[in-house]
Amino acid sequence: MTPTSSNPLARGWHRAASAFAAACVALLLAGCASVPGGDPLPSWNDGPAKKAIVSFVDDVTREGSPGFVPPAQRIATFDNDGTLWAEQPMYTQFAFMIDQVKAAAPRHPEWANNAVYKALAANDLRGALAGGEKPLLELLVQGNSGMSVDEYDKSVRQWLATARHPVLKRPYIETVYQPQLELLAYLRAKGFKTFIVSGGTMEVMRPWTQAAYGIPPEQVVGSSQGIKFDNNGVLMREPSLAFLNDGPGKPVGIYMHIGQRPILAFGNSDGDLQMLQYTVSGPGRSLALLVHHDDAAREFAYDRTSPFGKLDKAWDEAVRRNWVVVSMKNDWKRVFAQPKP
Amino acid sequence: MTPTSSNPLARGWHRAASAFAAACVALLLAGCASVPGGDPLPSWNDGPAKKAIVSFVDDVTREGSPGFVPPAQRIATFDNDGTLWAEQPMYTQFAFMIDQVKAAAPRHPEWANNAVYKALAANDLRGALAGGEKPLLELLVQGNSGMSVDEYDKSVRQWLATARHPVLKRPYIETVYQPQLELLAYLRAKGFKTFIVSGGTMEVMRPWTQAAYGIPPEQVVGSSQGIKFDNNGVLMREPSLAFLNDGPGKPVGIYMHIGQRPILAFGNSDGDLQMLQYTVSGPGRSLALLVHHDDAAREFAYDRTSPFGKLDKAWDEAVRRNWVVVSMKNDWKRVFAQPKP
């Protein structure tokens, strides 16, 4: 499943992943046991967020410190959309699934009278969401089923190799956040296992998370469509949503897939609230963080009223409970490996 | 979640895990990159099964060999019951769940008229199975729900620390197979990631698989009861079966949790047939193995007609497709770390 340099997707990764790869090599040379001399988080400004992270990591990893946690229990979970890469003007997952729906339309004449499909065909996302998220999700699930998981995997790779972000003007895979790549590498160097816990589907993330984030497929937790092992011995995609890994679904997904409570969780929206609540409900030290998108110049600015990545209840809870709110504008020296054109 | 030496369960593990721990230390000293001098599988007789394993591992791990597989894709999956530890006279999971049902009975006066409960209360397992597995499963699920996942986890640990196998006369945790501990360690030393893919529930396996097999919680795939994040921020067990990781469910569980097709799969019963079929349907080299329980003297002898761990269709398929059938009697020099009393 790991892309190799002989396929176009992997080549597309190289720019986005270059800083990450350099950090990895440096860590490997240092025996993966400690961060080599210098700042492990160079794209983070020296503010309260960075201080809170470094102080937490130091406390839970230093033998003899009051908060010490053995390596096997150093579990860190990261939301994906809006936490590790951009989610505006809509989730990349949706952009991909909508393209699959359009490609599947000739095989679905019954969609001609479907209001959601008609809106999507006219590139009217607001119209497609007029009846709420549910009818849109139903159509997306229908249009992303009926093929084998291997065929679908190929579609994900092909799409990501060519599709470009409409606003940031770059391949989607280059919308990953540089400071978070450094944080993931830093945590792993300190003995953490890093997991993605996303509302997006596992099958749309797993083809690229190893190359982009250094996170292998089995450490990607997400929503999932129904999958069936058919009579020909092939795993086929069913037209159903098997699990929604969002909101109260996130602690359940964590329990099902990871089997341990995280000690660090990083999100950016109300969909992450319960993951953060669950994380800080453990017996020892823990750290809950939220990205606040307040940087229209370098990325996007949105919070309480955004249709995607709404940050409202989780923000209030963060203030109430002293969780770390990371200001993209103030806490991140750099947002992407490459600046906005 | 990892037991420490201060709890009784961990102390109970020591005998069963001692050989495993010794192997681990030896591997660590060797840098975890190669098996130290000598036979990595000392409890396996030099027969066709051992030869097939060593030759396969050599082919997929030696750079330049025709079957070479990069480390990230070296996925090995093992069934648990009957493959890694004993499953007769009934699944250990059932023994535990039945004890939980009995303990919960005072809170369930409605069971007084339940035929399955009455049979269980009279220790009549055959009677409890008279209506098939389904009514029994329903009762087990009811009697193993209504508590938090943390409380349940504690029950699993307490039970395993004291319960003993009725025939083998030892703690259940000492019914793990010594040759398989060596095989797991050998595969990991060769860059494989080892997973459990069991019909048992994840929550009953995860408290002890790290200590017993060196397999961390997130690498344990199994069936699962419904889990809900309640309004108090607690993960509670629901009276439902969320996923049955058996038969055609195993490739689905593998896809959901691991996200890659295994290249080696080891089972022992018809419940493993589809996992093995899925494994050998990959594009490169793969190895499918079955334990055949033909050793009444040292363990148990059963196959085509056993109510637990029935080996019938999978055996026929193994013969047809040249899968490796491991004879417990002939291929294993030793079955347990300690012999049968």
Image: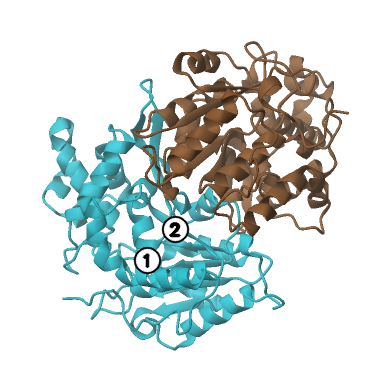
Chain colours: A cyan, B brown
Can residue A244 be seen by looking at this rendering?
no
Residue at screen point 34% across, 61% down: A212
* Residue A282, x across and y down, in percent: 65, 64
B27 relative to A85, above or below:
above
Do labels 2 and 1 touch, CB within 8 Å? Answer: yes
Circle 2 SS class: strand
Indicate the chain on which mark 2 is placed: A
Residue at screen point 75% across, 28% down: B110
Circle 1 SS class: loop
Q: Amino acid at mark 1?
A: Leu
Q: Residues within 10 Å of mark 1 (few under 14, many from 20)?
A: many
B51 relative to B317, above or below:
below
Q: Amino acid at mark 2?
A: Ile
* Residue A167, x across and y down, in percent: 17, 68
> Could you say which is closer to the camera, residue B209 or residue B130?
B209
In the rendered image, the quadrant that contains the C terminus of chain B is: top right
Q: Which residue is mark 2?
A: A196
Q: Which residue is mark 1?
A: A84
Discs 2 and 1 share one subunit: yes
Indicate the chain on which mark 1 is placed: A
